Image (cartoon, rainbow, N blue to C red):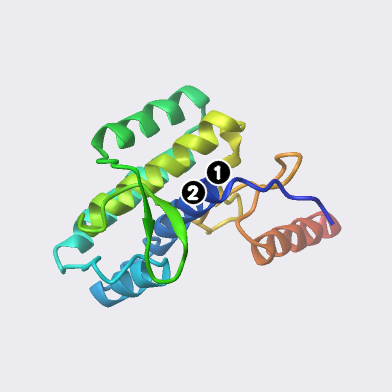
Amino acid sequence: MREQLNYAHYTDVPVMLARDLVNLFNEEITFEQLDEFVVSRGFTNSTVVRRRDLAEVAALAANLRDVFMADSEEEKVELINGLLNDSRVEPRLVDHDDGGVHFHYTSDEFPVLTKLRAYTSMGLAMVASQHDHGRLGSCVATGCTNVFVDTTRNASKRFCSAPCANRTNVASFRERRNA
């Protein structure tokens, strides 16, 4: 079993949020699915998802996808800086919902798009600045559009999941066997 890198909690949560948001929008989603996604990520009850947020969050997901798909470090940095420039980050320590004192990138009163942009851009920026830019990637399996965050020790991840890796490896084996 490969040992995995353990990003700090305040990097891990927002960068995985970015990954999950991009993958959520691989297909057209409903307002209800976006609302469920936001709630499942632990945003407090003060975060209200409005119907008009769906198109704006879809655009954010597309911008985040561009970061994962970028071929070079320079391109990733430029895209992340663009996200950061569009973000409204107001860091603060908070204590709510019996969670103890913890860090938030934005005010609880900010709209959902503002929160998602701040959290995801900060997470991507921390991974890109502290680790190899190749840690943010896209699945190489045929037909898969998922992105991933590579947490393997040797930065060797190529697939978003074991099923994608297995399908690709089986297809490759069959192709070699039939050649």
Answer above or below: position of 138 versus 46: above
Measuring from the top left, give residue 113's x and y in whole percent. 24, 54
Residue located farthest toward the left when viewing the structure as drawn: 52
- Quadrant in the rendering for residue 164: bottom right
Badge 1 crowding class, 10 Å Cα cut-off, few under 14, some 14 to 19, many 20 or more, is many
Residue type at the position of mark 2: Val
Compared to 82, does 173 lie above or below?
Answer: below
Q: Residue visible at 16% across and 69% down?
A: 51
- Residue 73 placed where, x, y %? 51, 26
Mark 2 Cα within 10 Å, few/some/many (few <14, many 20+)? many
- Where in the figure is residue 163, as x and y percent of width and height? 67, 67
Q: Nearer the viewer, residue 48 or 150?
A: 48
Q: Residue at x 61, y 31 (%)?
A: 132
Which residue is painted at 33% across and 45% down in the image?
118
Mark 2 residue element? helix
Q: CA distance from mark 1 to mark 2?
A: 12 Å
Question: Which callout, 1 or 2, points at the residue further toward the start of the chain?
Answer: 2
**Figure check: 124 above or below 15:** above
Res 15 label:
2
Location of residue 35 (image quadrant): bottom left
Please name whichever residue, 51 or 178, is drawn nearer the observer in this view of the structure. 51
Residue on which the image places disc 1? 137
